[in-house]
Amino acid sequence: MASEISTKEYITHHLTNATMCNTETGVAFNKACADAGFWQWNVDTLGWSIAMGLLFLFIFRSVAKKATSGVPSKMQAFVELVVDFVDDNVKSTFHGKSVLIAPLALTIFVWVLLMNLLDLMPVDVLPSIAGLIGQYGFGMDPHDVYMKAVPTTDLNMTFALALGVFALILFYSIKVKGLGGFAKELSMQPFGHPVFIPVNLILEVVTLLARPLSLALRLFGNLYASELIFILIATIGFFQLPLHFVWAVFHILVLPLQAFIFMMLTIVYLSLACEDH
Amino acid sequence: MNINATLIGQLIAFTVFVLFCMKYVWPPIMAAIEERQKKIADGLAASDRAEKDLQIAQEKAKEQLKEAKQQAAEIIEQAKKRATQIVDQETERAHQERDKIIASGQTEIEAERNRAKEELRKQVAILAVAGAEKILARQIDAAAQSDIVEKLVAEL
């Protein structure tokens, strides 16, 4: 494909989501959705993320159903390793009692990790398959078929995770401190005098809002950049192979690290929200 | 790269996944892990206890063995003492028996000798009288010289 089109088009093609929307004539895709505004769905992001989520739940649920306290199977040992790792991190950071935090952290860690791992897929494989299906299944021009497989390179995905965490931050803040306590925390810190309320409010609200924003943008930025580099490497021809290998090896570190950071910050933010001053 | 309705879809998916994980995945796995941890802790405690019990039992056995050895030694000592005692007693008794037998033998011998002496005296008297009778038959009457014979018999 790269030979037929310019490098710019190639990169743009790889970084465009497959979208779906409703128009007057029915369900439409991609370019037809250009002016659908907010109400369009990135079907590749949705499809791959939900597939990864279901994979995670399927594996862990199948182990959970057969979980034994005796000698574990190899699969159970692996799952327990992950669960224990998450549980250790939660216990060392979050000192309250909550049935939600640990499963939440596990879901975030494994789900984000699985989605990130899609990044290691050679960049042309999934778009090519999607292009072929589009061409021979639906008679479309393969250049109009988009497939951005890594869900975490889509801001919608990372913001959805971050907003979910943000909602929990607000929920726990109000639940633990009460509405008044939460308001007081926002307005009477760090300077404990009524004169400083506007200053405090600005500082604290910015701090509060920066949390989901930084969560979402950190994950998105890392994954988007790495995907972009993978695509750039793919454009240089034969010598992409060693470069691609080095970059991929580096991402064996980066991808789990980003998943871990997202999980850890979630735990930290929620434990801060549950702390009563 | 725009924010669009996907965000809503992802939020719903996220919520559903977390709730499913919280209800059906986390509790059974955690329960299994905790139960195993408890089992292992119990096992370790039991093995500790068993080790202590074993030590106590070994000490007890050692003590009993020592006691038994001591008793055995005492019994052997007693038996030896008793044996020498018996031997001594028996020797003593045998000596006495011997002495008694010897003494009675001697008395018997004495009695026998006395009897034989008496007998011999009587025989010699008769022999003497017969000899004297034969010598004197030719010259004197036996009755007339009987007082002399009587005298002779008494002297023997």
Image: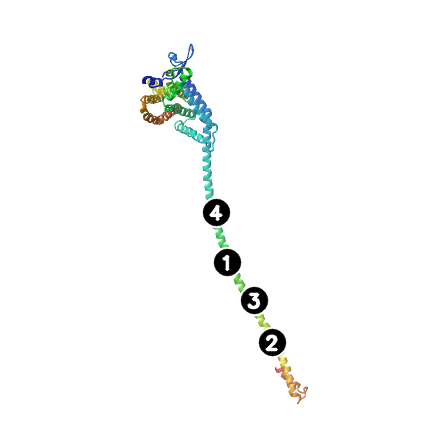
**Whether marks 1 and 2 lie on the same chain:** yes
**Whether marks 2 and 3 lie on the same chain:** yes
Query: Hey, what amino acid is under mark 4?
Result: Ala
Location of residue B30 by image quarter = top left
Reading the image, the residue beneath label 3 is B97
Reading the image, the residue beneath label 4 is B61
Q: Compared with residue B107, is residue A34 higher up or lower down, i.e. above or below?
A: above
Query: Hey, what amino acid is under mark 1?
Result: Lys
Residue at disc 3, secondary structure: helix
Q: How is the image coloured?
A: rainbow
Q: Earlier in the sequence, mark 1 or mark 3?
A: 1
Q: Residues within 10 Å of mark 4 (few under 14, many from 20)?
A: few
Q: Earlier in the sequence, mark 1 or mark 4?
A: 4
**Whether marks 1 and 4 lie on the same chain:** yes
Query: Hey, what amino acid is under mark 2?
Result: Asn
Q: Compared with residue A40, is residue A115 higher up or lower down, i.e. above or below?
A: below
Reading the image, the residue beneath label 2 is B114
Query: Hey, what amino acid is under mark 3?
Result: Glu
Q: Earlier in the sequence, mark 4 or mark 2?
A: 4
From mark 4 to mark 2, how far is it between C-alphas?
78 Å
The residue that appears at 46% across and 37% down in the rendered structure is B43
Reading the image, the residue beneath label 1 is B80
Image location of residue B100, percent across then percent down = 57, 68
Instruction: Give the quadrant of the C terminus of chain B.
Output: bottom right
The residue that appears at 48% across and 50% down in the rendered structure is B67
Image location of residue B66, percent across then percent down = 47, 50
Residue at disc 4, secondary structure: helix
| Mark 1 vs mark 2: in front | 1
Q: Residues within 10 Å of mark 2 (few under 14, many from 20)?
A: few
Q: Residues within 10 Å of mark 3 (few under 14, many from 20)?
A: few
Left or right of A210 on screen, residue A72: right
Count up the numbered dots. Answer: 4
